[in-house]
Image (cartoon, grey):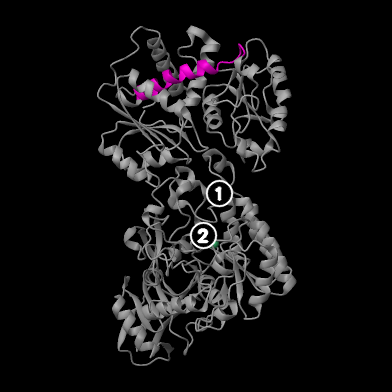
């Protein structure tokens, strides 16, 4: 039995936490004690939008390296996007990804299934087979590409409803964003970079919420990035549409101004937007219009970023820095308290993904998934804070608040005293836990 | 001056200083021996990822007149293999001891990436990057305008009061961007004329006046009309319906050219699409300074290389 002493729970109360047999236990006699004085105990973070790249792009990330990055950031579960090679569009591939996650044991890996075969946007993938596989897929997404054909999107929403699933849409009108490089506005005009207009996101979201309402299905909107999108979603929720939405940490903190030096670390899709958009996203997250934070962790090899802006890959790594960035962007600014963070970064994403065990994270009997976080720490974020394969972080050299001290996944530590526990030990413990 | 990446960074005095050095260089060109020993022992690399013989040759002549060694690296041919990264190329050039790299690249910002990268220590000259900037073109345009305005008494002077109308595809034009910033710094007033599809988002924030009607702009009697090259492939992307419609609405034909005041000049960065954005009559008329632009290009590029490499660098240091 592990005893965590003096942790501050998300609601602000102080409590000891007991862990035994992988679960939160009633007070007893501990064999190990962890001093959590001054630390916040947050429920294990759940990422609804992670690119783990395996199978197919192991030079960018693997399930193991991505899992380590996740654990170091305080996560205990991640949802792995479908744009692997082969694509996660069959039961076989999603089961493979899930079992890799189980074997490594740092986090629970929940595969996301493709909506369409090969993410090509033409024909529905075998959604039923993935839903009924051992991986029990509940989130379906062509992320990276938008399901832009209206009829196909309608059918996907209806079909996925059959399995209590949800379509997570990457909202991007492809015709309006041909070769788009950054937010369209004054700056893109000056820099001579092709613009990615806000309307290309907002028009797809508007269409999708109407479709979701029409067929009575659930819709999840990935990485909302504009003030207009927040308005559309707010309007849809007021109409009773069953829609949820996510925002990334980087869209909560960074703006398009960072593109001015053509440093491709700041190239991401959807692009960084204006100050007004950042303000609207923070307000939307605070008032519940936006339900969750999700990282869109997108590792790339160094050479994919060491080039001219329009030749560089889109994407940033984000698992390791996510909680610190959320603290900087919305906690320290007064938009969210820690209970809100627990909701938007754990309970609610778990609910959207139909992941059990996160509803009452500190109740006796719940699976012990939590992280101990020191909000008073402050660090200059550096390469040494990155634990996946990607170093394409926009935060390198920036001072960020907070530090993940300990992460407990299914009752065993994956991060201890700020250091990742050795992979062999974690894998062995995970194996023993699975029985 | 460490690099020349953009005209955005040039203030009035720096820009006037470059034009003045270019005037000295132009004087050299009239002498029997056109060569100066100034950059002997320095190596200038022309790194052209995009084909542009006229710009490359202009830089090459400029460097040679200053006695620099010139190496041409071009994507056409064997020196830059397809897929070789900017980084690998830059490191190769650094190993060769390049003192200045003149780069033409299809990607906006590539010269800036090179300058900021730490891969190479050389001075970087932007010879046109994507749809971003083409600073030496704008400098040679300003030089040409200043000579027309002030003749032999141009030294030390800017373009205060000059009225310049730029016509055409501003959205995709690096020449237009560099000209807008530089002309603004030099005190000229700029008017832009194009269909709304060919204007960048946010142009209302630029220091220019914007209009859609070329005839109205001609009737205002500008001192300078600068026609931008229009690329036929823009039609397929629905920026305008047909070449004929574009030419009728926004082309400088003989009739429009004839309506310009006596002293007005017509400019074009080249290469021209005769019959599309400019008629043959307008291109070859006495108003046209297109060939002067070419000649002045060498003087401007000599001035830029000199300021980058001579180590005197008091202009815009
Ligand atoms: Zn996406």
Q: Residue at x 36, y 39 (%)?
A: B78
Q: Secondary structure at mark 2?
A: loop
Q: Is residue A49 above or below residue B180?
A: below
Q: Nearer the viewer, residue A233 or A150?
A: A150
Judge whether residue B286 is colored magenta: yes
Q: Nearer the viewer, residue A209 or B103?
A: B103
Left or right of residue B291, residue A418 in this image: left
Q: Position of residue A221 (x, y in %)?
A: 61, 66
Q: Chain of mark 2?
A: A
Query: In the rendered image, is residue A7 in sight?
Result: no
What residue is pinned by disc 2?
Answer: A333
Q: Main secondary structure of the magenta part?
A: helix
Q: Which mark is residue A179?
A: 1
Q: Position of residue A195 (x, y in %)?
A: 58, 46
Magenta stretch bounds: B285-307
Q: Position of residue A375 (x, y in %)?
A: 41, 67
Which quarter of the figure is the N terminus of chain A placed in? bottom left
Disc 2: residue Cβ within 8 A of ligand 1's nearest atom: no
In the rendered picture of this protein, how many numbered marks are placed on residues? 2
Left or right of residue A151, residue B149 in this image: left
Tell me the CA gap for discs 2 and 1.
35 Å
């Amino acid at each position: 039995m592990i005893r965590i002493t003096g942790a501050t729970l998300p609601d602000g109360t102080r409590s000891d936490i007991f862990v035994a047999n992988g679960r939160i236990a009633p007070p007893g006699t501990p064999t190990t004690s962890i001093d959590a004085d001054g630390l916040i105990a947050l429920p294990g973070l759940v990422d609804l939008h992670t690119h783990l790249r395996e199978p197919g792009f192991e030079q960018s990330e693997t399930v193991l390296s991505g899992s380590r990055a996740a654990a170091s950031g305080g996560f205990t579960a991640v949802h792995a996007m479908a744009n692997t090679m082969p694509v996660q569009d069959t039961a076989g591939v999603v089961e493979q990804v899930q079992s890799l996650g189980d074997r490594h044991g740092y986090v629970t890996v929940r595969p996301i299934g493709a909506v369409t075969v090969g993410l090509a946007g033409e024909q529905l993938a075998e959604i039923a087979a993935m839903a009924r596989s051992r991986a029990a897929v509940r989130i379906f997404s062509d992320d990276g590409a938008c399901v832009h054909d209206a009829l196909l999107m309608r059918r996907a929403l209806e079909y996925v409803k059959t399995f209590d699933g949800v379509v997570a849409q990457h909202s991007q009108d492809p015709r309006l964003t041909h070769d788009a490089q950054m937010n369209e506005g004054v700056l893109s005009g000056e820099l001579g970079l092709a613009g990615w207009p806000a309307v290309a996101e907002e028009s797809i979201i508007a269409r999708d919420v109407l479709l979701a309402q029409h067929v009575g299905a659930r819709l999840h909107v990935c990485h909302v990035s504009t003030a207009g999108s927040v308005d559309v979603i707010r309007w849809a929720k007021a109409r009773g549409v069953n829609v949820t939405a996510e925002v990334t940490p980087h869209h909560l903190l960074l703006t398009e101004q960072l593109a001015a030096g053509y440093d491709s670390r700041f190239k991401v899709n959807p692009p960084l937007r204006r100050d007004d958009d950042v303000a609207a996203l923070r307000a939307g997250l605070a008032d519940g219009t936006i339900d969750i934070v999700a990282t869109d962790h997108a590792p790339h090899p160094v050479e994919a970023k060491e080039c001219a802006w329009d030749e560089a890959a889109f994407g940033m790594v984000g698992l390791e820095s996510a909680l610190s960035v959320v603290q900087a962007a919305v906690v320290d600014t007064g938009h969210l308290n820690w209970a809100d963070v627990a909701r938007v970064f754990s309970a609610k994403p778990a609910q959207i993904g139909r992941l059990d065990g996160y509803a009452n994270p500190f109740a006796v009997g719940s699976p012990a998934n939590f992280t101990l976080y020191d909000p008073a720490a402050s660090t200059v974020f550096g390469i040494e804070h990155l634990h996946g394969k990607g170093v394409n972080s926009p935060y390198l050299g920036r001072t960020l608040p907070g530090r993940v001290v300990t992460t407990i996944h299914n009752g065993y530590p994956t991060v201890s005293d700020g250091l990742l526990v050795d992979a062999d030990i974690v894998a062995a413990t995970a194996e023993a836990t699975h029985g | 001056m460490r690099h020349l990446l953009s005209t955005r960074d040039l203030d009035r005095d720096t820009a006037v200083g470059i034009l003045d050095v270019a005037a000295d260089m132009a004087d050299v060109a009239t002498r029997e021996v056109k060569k100066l020993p100034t950059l002997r022992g320095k190596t200038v690399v022309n790194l052209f990822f995009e084909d542009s013989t006229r710009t490359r040759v202009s830089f090459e002549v400029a460097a040679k007149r200053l006695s620099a060694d010139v190496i041409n690296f071009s994507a056409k041919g064997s020196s830059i293999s397809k897929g070789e990264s900017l980084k690998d190329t830059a490191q190769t050039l650094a190993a060769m001891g390049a003192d200045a790299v003149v780069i033409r690249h299809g990607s906006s910002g590539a010269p800036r990436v090179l300058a900021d990268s730490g891969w190479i220590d050389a001075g970087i000259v932007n010879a046109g990057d994507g749809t971003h900037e083409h600073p030496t073109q704008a400098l040679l345009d300003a030089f040409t305008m200043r000579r027309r305005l002030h003749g032999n008494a141009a030294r030390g002077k800017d373009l205060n009061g000059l009225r310049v109308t730029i016509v055409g595809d501003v959205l995709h034009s690096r020449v237009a961007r560099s000209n807008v910033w530089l002309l603004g710094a030099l005190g000229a007033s700029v008017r832009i004329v194009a269909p709304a599809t060919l204007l960048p988002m946010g142009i209302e924030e630029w220091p220019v006046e914007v209009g859609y009607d070329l005839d109205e702009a001609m009737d205002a009697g500008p001192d300078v009309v600068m026609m931008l090259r229009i690329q036929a492939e823009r039609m397929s992307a629905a920026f305008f319906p047909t070449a004929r419609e574009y030419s009728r609405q926004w082309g400088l034909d003989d009739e429009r050219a004839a309506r310009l005041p006596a002293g007005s000049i017509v400019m074009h960065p080249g290469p021209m699409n005769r019959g599309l954005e400019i008629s043959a009559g307008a291109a070859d008329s006495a108003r046209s300074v297109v060939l002067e632009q070419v000649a002045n290009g060498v003087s401007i590029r000599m001035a830029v290389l000199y300021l980058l490499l001579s180590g005197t660098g008091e202009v815009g240091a």
